[in-house]
Amino acid sequence: MKTEELIERGKKYLMQTYTRPAMVLDKGAGTKVWDLEGKQYYDFVGGIAVNALGYSHPKLVQVIKEQAEKLIHCSNLYYSEPQINLAKMLVELSCGDKVFFGNSGAEVNEGAIKIAIKYFKNQGEDKHRIIYMKNSFHGRTIATLAATGQYKYQKDYLSILPKFKEAIFNDLDSVKAGIDQEVAAVLLEPIQGEGGINVATEEFIKGLRELCNQEGILLIFDEIQCGLGRTGKMFAYQHYGVEPDILTIAKSLGAGIPIGALIAKEKIASSFKPGDHGTTFGGNPLACAAAIANLKVIQEEDLVGKCQEKGEYFKTKLEGLKEKYPQKIKEIRGLGLMIGVELEEEGQEIVKKCLEEGVLINCTAKKVLRFLPPLIVQKEEIDYLIDILNKILM
Ligand SMILES: Cc1ncc(COP(=O)(O)O)c(C=O)c1O
């Protein structure tokens, strides 16, 4: 079927929750993807920080095929080997002790909020509020929307959203001001993604850890976008020398197969007893096998180290563009391969022009070009993007 006909069909049958360009993606390999007409694109969006290994990585494909032939799904009424082994891997890699698997970022953040409240409930305390940051993004379910500090997403549901409290990112006093007897936890992304690639300062993160300790409340890091190697460390919290009590990851965990993980320290993890929380699909054998294969490739190919190195290279190139076009580029931010370019004007036009030139990029918070390429991106591919941006900004 032709692109135009297919898009027409899509408009008829799909809820129009996204504004999409007039092309249909068909296949991919490495950092490249092709549309139905055979046009090639370099992908610097990476499925919004999902496609860590790019497209069609042979080791990932092989494991998915083998697991699909063996056992795709068995529910959480039974143990499966991939789920147990993935939990072990994540605990060994992170600061957590136990894992609960969900299917998406919002779902595991929802779990994080529930377990924080349950932790205090079990001690006879009614702490049911979360402090979240302005410009955060934690998902689109009711509780995660309540913790998403962006009015545009919350506004139609305010009457049913739990009353959480907003604080200012990188402003410890604003968090202190929000703490009272009802607060169970502080939830934040160490590097805000949707909010415009805003990196938390070391002072803020260390201050938050101390504050939470003093107040006896929990610190939750949402590393759904910034976790698993992207920032040049396996987890973003490792840049700060501070450990959260609860950690959530999703997006790149399954390298394209939906899976999320809620990871917690033992004293919190044990708050959930059989029946307290659950999900039908979460951590099914196929998704867990894919995640194990993904983590193995990340480790074997030192993609975390490469992220650090390529991120530096990428940022230096972008700084070059900033020097050349100071009237157009305001700031370059980010860590590793999670990079934002704040423009002086809105960025959607640049996204459109890049698409025409065969490069997929994204713009968030209206003025921030956001780059989240696969962790396997090559320097020549970064050079290609820089040349295109140079041409567009000229
Ligand atoms: C930091 C962060 N948390 C949570 C989410 C929600 O994840 P999902 O779309 O998988 O529900 C996102 C998605 O963009 C995110 O970036």
Image (spheres, grey):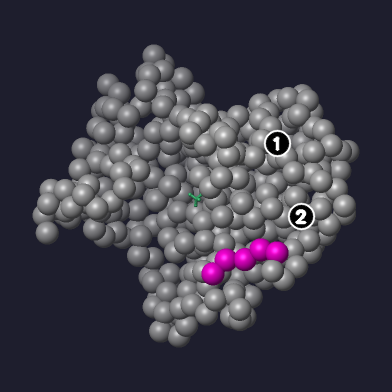
- Callout 1: CB less than 8 Å from ligand 1: no
Q: Position of residue 183 (x, y in %)?
A: 78, 39
According to the image, label 2 marks what residue? 118
Q: Residue 320 or 96: which is nearer the viewer?
A: 96
Q: Position of residue 219 (x, y in %)?
A: 75, 44
Q: Residue 190 or 125: which is nearer the viewer?
A: 125
Q: In the image, 394: left or right of 79?
A: left
Q: What residue appears at the point 64 percent right and 33 percent down from the top-left corner?
A: 133
- Identify the image quadrant of the C terminus: top left
Q: What residue appears at the point 53 percent right and 47 percent down from the top-left corner?
A: 141
Please, is residue 144 above or below residue 392 in the view? below
For mark 1, give the secondary structure: strand
Crowd class of label 2 (few under 14; some 14 to 19; many from 20; radius 10 Å): many
Please, is residue 41 above or below residue 78 in the view? above
For mark 2, give the secondary structure: helix
Q: Residue 268 or 358: which is nearer the viewer?
A: 268
Measure how far apart labels 2 and 1 are at the Cα level. 16 Å
Amino acid type at image mark 1? Ile
Among numbered discs 2 and 1, the one appearing first in the sequence: 2
Q: Position of residue 259 (x, y in %)?
A: 52, 62
According to the image, label 1 marks what residue? 131
- The span shown in magenta is 276-280
Q: What residue appears at the point 70 percent right and 46 percent down from the top-left corner?
A: 220
Amino acid type at image mark 2? Lys
Instruction: Inspect this view and state whether residue 198 appears.
Output: no
* Residue located farthest toward the top when viewing the structure as drawn: 327
The label nearer to you, 2 versus 1, is 2
Q: In the image, 196: left or right of 121?
A: left
Please name the predominant secondary structure of the magenta segment in the image. Answer: loop
Q: In the image, 2: left or right of 193?
A: left
